[in-house]
Image (spheres, rainbow, N blue to C red):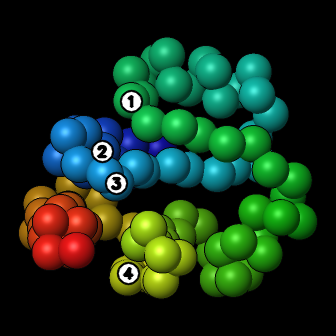
Amino acid sequence: MDEMNSLIILNDKLKNTNNEFISFTFDIPSTIKRVKENKKINFKIIHVTDKECRRLNFNSGFPQHIVVDEKGNVEYIGSSFKNNEDTIKEIADLLINKSTIQ
């Protein structure tokens, strides 16, 4: 939950690009809806099973951030960037620059 504000900022930076930020969780849809409303989350959160959540996250713990380009290439893997403006800028710049070059 501590990272939600940073993730909202990242999604805002990607708003007018061809990039999209999504999140997945094993939380039930009613919990997802409540959290989105309470935190004013502006990105998609997708419910998956607990098993699928662990598979997508390489069983390396939560939270895990994976940036994938439009061709499916993994551009960034990291964990926990609570209010880290440098990391947010790095990821946004990586995606925005890559999408404008191609």
Q: CA distance from mark 3 to mark 4?
A: 14 Å
Rendered residue at 65%/30% (across/down): 32
Q: Read off the residue under disc 3.
A: 19
On screen, residue 31 versus residue 83, left or right, reads: right
Q: Earlier in the sequence, mark 1 or mark 2?
A: 2
Nearest to the observer: residue 13 or residue 98 = 98
The residue that label 4 is drawn on is: 76
Q: CA distance from mark 3 to mark 1?
A: 14 Å
Q: Residues within 10 Å of mark 4 (few under 14, many from 20)?
A: some
Say which amino acid is labelled 3.
Asn
Using the image, determine if residue 1 lies above or below residue 41.
below
Residue identifier under label 1: 42
Decide if residue 46 is on the left or right side of residue 101.
Answer: right
Query: Which of 15/33 is in front?
Result: 15
Give the spatial CA distance, label 1 vs label 2.
7 Å
Q: Which quarter of the figure has residue 30?
A: top right
**Position above or below: 72 against 11:** below
Marks 3/1 in contact by CB < 8 Å: the verdict is no
Q: Earlier in the sequence, mark 3 or mark 1?
A: 3
Task: Read off the residue under disc 2.
Answer: 11
The residue drawn where x is 30% and y is 44% is 11
Helix or strand or loop: what does disc 1 sit on? loop
The spot of residue 66 in percent (x, y) is 48, 72
SS for dot 3 = loop
Query: How far apart are the alpha carbons under marks 3 and 2?
Result: 9 Å
> How many numbered markers are drawn?
4
Q: Are marks 1 and 2 in contact (CB under 8 Å)?
A: yes
